[in-house]
Amino acid sequence: MSNYIYNDDFSNSNGYGPNIDLEDDSSENRISSRLLITVCIACAVFSLLFGILGGFLVSKNRVIKTDVYTNTIYKAPVANQIVVNENETAKLADIVELVQDSVVEIQTEYVIHSYYQAVRSGAGSGVIVGEYQLNGEKTGYNIITNAHVIQGQSAGSIASKITVILRDGTQYNAYCVGFDVEGDVAIIRIEEKSKELSCASFTGDDDLRVGDSVIAIGNPLGELGGSVTTGVISALDREIEIDGNIMNLMQTNAAINPGNSGGGLFDMSGRLVGIVNAKSSGTGIEGLGFAIPAKDACKMYSDIINYGYVKDKPTIGAVFAEYIDGSVRIYSLEKGYNEKVFRTGDKIISVNGEPVSSASEIIAIVRKSEIGSTIKFKVARSVGREYQTITVEAKVFEYTPSK
């Protein structure tokens, strides 16, 4: 089991619905049957109307804008927009002063539907990385953060309310432009026409080296916005599994805490080299923080802005699950991919001739495959009361939400 966790694994609940106090009335036997029927009918009508109205309000609050790309022009992050002259020796405080206004606090709320209705809240960080323009006129700013920071009650859902707080305390309502769960990146947007906000500058991170000093800025514990920690790059390309999701991340020993998710990792030139998203958990473990490398975050940012999803992602359209008997099976199949090749419940024995024992192994093979290629699977398929071992070939597709 993975010891790596996302950084916003804390939340609180409030807003519970009213408690209903049912009192016993000893005189109810004296109520006439006609009056009782009238009261029951009135209550039923009231409950129906209240339910319809409540459902409308809840559904209204959960609507996600889908037409944000219409007639829009996006301005990509400008290289060296915020950067210290490389020929100068800058103090740490000087660099922090240049970049800290580009890092924001993010607060989220989403409704939990259970016996009682509650509003759950969360907190994280984000980095302003570009302007949003409409017909050539600036109308707002794009902010990059982690998908898990703005996630709602279930995977793939978005919080019903997203609030962005600048370093000076200014608050904005934000909405989601798009997100990618596997890459753990989301783009949210705030409307601001008149005020000029600081935008961080992505670096291609080709010149980064292990041992380079870095600065992490974020909102640890969800209440200490603008906190600065320092460290070095411990590794440039770590393959880390988080909640069954395999990611290639940059490792740092800068202090990373819950709430830092989505915050910026900057180099000593003030360039954005990573988006903080995870840490290692466990007793006695220190100095193991992780960030999405800037080149990967920038690619996902550009794809989400321009296409609404991340392009060039290989998939075979199958969801794998690990069962208590130790087997890995096909849990579900998406339409438009390999639903005629696999069957739900197929046990995966080997992939391209290599035995596999976990879903993450299979996912890693798929992600490293070229789009258009094929992958050989040896599976045990249920035929009546027995299993038949067969070999099938699955095509690797580019994932698109329209399928």
Image (cartoon, grey):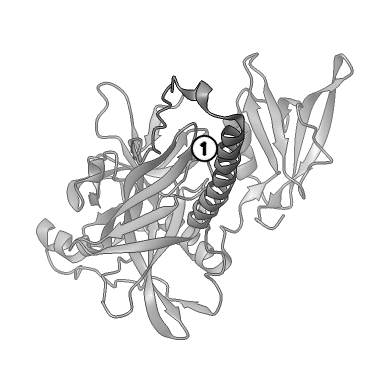
Residue drawn at x 16%, y 61% is: 95
Furthest toward the bottom, the residue is: 136
* Left or right: 197, with 151 as reference point: left
The image position of residue 152, as x and y in percent, is 47, 45
Q: Which of 137/170 is in front?
A: 170
Residue drawn at x 63%, y 38% is: 365
User: Is residue 91 among the parts visible in the rendering?
Assistant: no
Residue drawn at x 24%, y 43% is: 220
* Left or right: 91, with 287 as reference point: left
The image position of residue 227, as x and y in percent, is 18, 49
When the figure is inspected, residue 23 is found, relative to residue 302, above or below; the finding is above
The image position of residue 286, as x and y in percent, is 24, 30
Residue 202 figure quarter? bottom left
Furthest toward the right, the residue is: 384
Q: Secondary structure at mark 1?
A: strand
Residue drawn at x 66%, y 36% is: 319
Q: Which residue is mark 1?
A: 245
Residue 47 figure quarter? top right
Q: Which of 339/9 is in front?
A: 9
The amino acid at mark 1 is Asn
Q: Which of 85/240 is in front?
A: 240
User: Is residue 183 among the parts visible in the rendering?
Assistant: yes
When the figure is inspected, residue 154 is found, relative to residue 170, above or below; the finding is above
Q: How many marks?
A: 1
Residue 398 figure quarter? bottom right
Q: Which of 332/88 is in front?
A: 332
On-image quarter of the C terminus? bottom right
Are there few (<14), some (14-19), or many (20+) residues within 10 Å of tag 1?
Answer: some
